[in-house]
Amino acid sequence: AAFISIQAFPALLDLPQDLEVSAVSCGSRHTAAVTRGGELYTWGWGKYGQLGHGNSTSSDQARRVEHLVAQGLRVEEVVCGPWTTYVRV
């Protein structure tokens, strides 16, 4: 089982250099960020699939949700719940 660091204080996030974040939402143990280009990045605890990567893997690193890119969807808004992530495209 992967260990996921849960931090109660701000931490520097590494995203590719050309990305600008326009919105962020935090759930109980996961976080999601929308870029100005309409891409969604998620990280944290993923046991219930709330990261949107098609599995239940957790990640300390922000990862782009490839399914939305593959479908040609542009993310406008994200809201994280306790074990869920809601996305408006």
Image: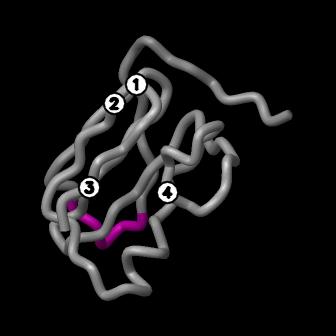
> Furthest residue to the top?
8
Q: Is residue 34 left or right of residue 40?
A: left
Helix or strand or loop: what does disc 3 sit on?
Answer: strand
Give the labeled residue for mark 2: 81
Q: Is residue 54 left or right of residue 39?
A: right
> Do the numbered discs 4 and 1 sit on residues whose CB atoms are within 8 Å?
no
Residue, x 27% and y 79% (percent of image)?
73
Hey, what amino acid is under mark 2? Gly
Mark identifier at residue 87: 3
Assign the magenta stretch its main secondary structure.
loop
Give the labeled residue for mark 1: 82
Q: Residues within 10 Å of mark 1 (few under 14, many from 20)?
A: few
Q: On screen, 78 above or below 38?
A: above
Q: What is the x, y in percent for residue 69?
A: 38, 81
Give the labeled residue for mark 4: 52
Q: What is the x, y in percent for residue 32?
A: 35, 45
* In magenta segment, residue 78: no
Foreground pick, 75 / 84: 84
Report how far apart the C-alphas of labels 4 and 1 lie in the structure.
Answer: 14 Å
Report how far apart the C-alphas of labels 4 and 3 lie in the structure.
Answer: 10 Å
Helix or strand or loop: what does disc 2 sit on?
Answer: loop
First reached walking from the N terminus: tag 4 or tag 3: 4
Hey, what amino acid is under mark 4? Gly
Q: Residues within 10 Å of mark 3 (few under 14, many from 20)?
A: some
Span shown in magenta: 16-20
Q: Quadrant of residue 34?
A: bottom left
Report how far apart the C-alphas of labels 3 and 2 lie in the structure.
Answer: 11 Å
